[in-house]
Amino acid sequence: DIQMSQSPSSLSASIGDRVTITCRASQNIINSLNWYQQKPGKAPRLLIFAASRLQAGVPSRFSGSGSGTAFTLTINSLQPEDFATYHCQQTYTTPLYTFGQGTKLEIK
Amino acid sequence: EVQLAQSGGGLVQPGGSLRLSCVASGFNFNSFGLNWVRQAPGKGLEWISYISGSRSAIFYADSVKGRFTVSRDNAQNSLYLQMDTLRAEDTAIYYCARDELIAGSLPGLDSWGQGVLVTVSS
């Protein structure tokens, strides 16, 4: 099974900051990596698919990069609505998906 | 507008059973695979099951294999999860999610139900 790990588990940032979240896979998954945003009490929302492609309607301040086993989600110029939990998901073994443990982004 | 409306959560004793439902609207239901994903309190997301549009492909996570059964009724635009022999560790919010092939070939869970809470406790 492919294991996914995210770091950090949580981080604090201020409005306007640039933040980066890392996701690592236990084996090479090429670019089969999605990112989701989840707000408290809500279902996850797909942000980025295939490591770097922005889902329709997602603001351009979100970006993804990486390949192989290491991936990053970057949010430029944090907005109040960006404070949420972010999850990575490997789709290499679709549809047997695996998610990371999540990264909670909080306001400093 | 794509919508997935869930029902069926609740409190159940260990060893008991529960059936979750997910009714879809706004898209050609039988053309899409569907997933169940759960989230234990304060934890990350866990994929637990997938069923293809034609029901020809069904998969389960090891954590629920042999205890949970996924099914769908394409005439009723409905997805189900029959959960048997429930354990305390099955306590979670359960989501149904549509499996989309974005740009024709890139998988992603692009639409989700609102989630229902299943609590397994005596």
Image (cartoon, coloured by chain):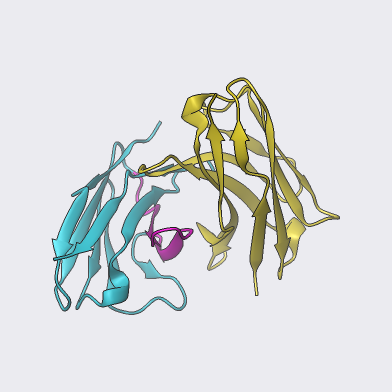
Chain colours: A cyan, B yellow
Q: Is residue B70 above or below residue B103?
A: above
User: What residue lies at 41% left-to-right and 30% top-to-bottom?
Assistant: A1
Q: Is residue A102 above or below residue B14?
A: below
Left or right? Give the position of A74 relative to B23.
left
Report the residue at 32% width, 79% height from top.
Answer: A60
Does residue A72 show up?
Answer: no
Q: Position of residue B32 (x, y in %)?
A: 68, 57
Residue A92 x, y percent position in the rendering: 44, 45
Could you tell whether B25 is left or right of B90 in the image? right
Quick check: can you spot residue B31?
Answer: yes
Residue closer to the observer: A96 or B3:
B3
Residue at the spot x=68%, y=28% of the render?
B17
B86 or A100, which is in the foreground? Answer: B86
Q: Position of residue B54 (x, y in %)?
A: 76, 48
On screen, B45 above or below A49? above
In the picture, which quadrant includes the C terminus of chain B? Answer: top right
Residue at 65%, 75% (x, y): give it: B1
Q: Nearer the viewer, residue B42 or B38?
A: B42
Q: Position of residue B83 (x, y in %)?
A: 65, 31
List the single residue furthest toward the right: B75
Q: Is residue A84 left or right of residue B101?
A: left
Is A33 within the magenta?
Answer: yes
Picture mark count: 0
Q: Residue furthest front?
A: B122
Q: Is residue A41 magenta?
A: yes
Q: Which residues are drawn in magenta? A: A29-50
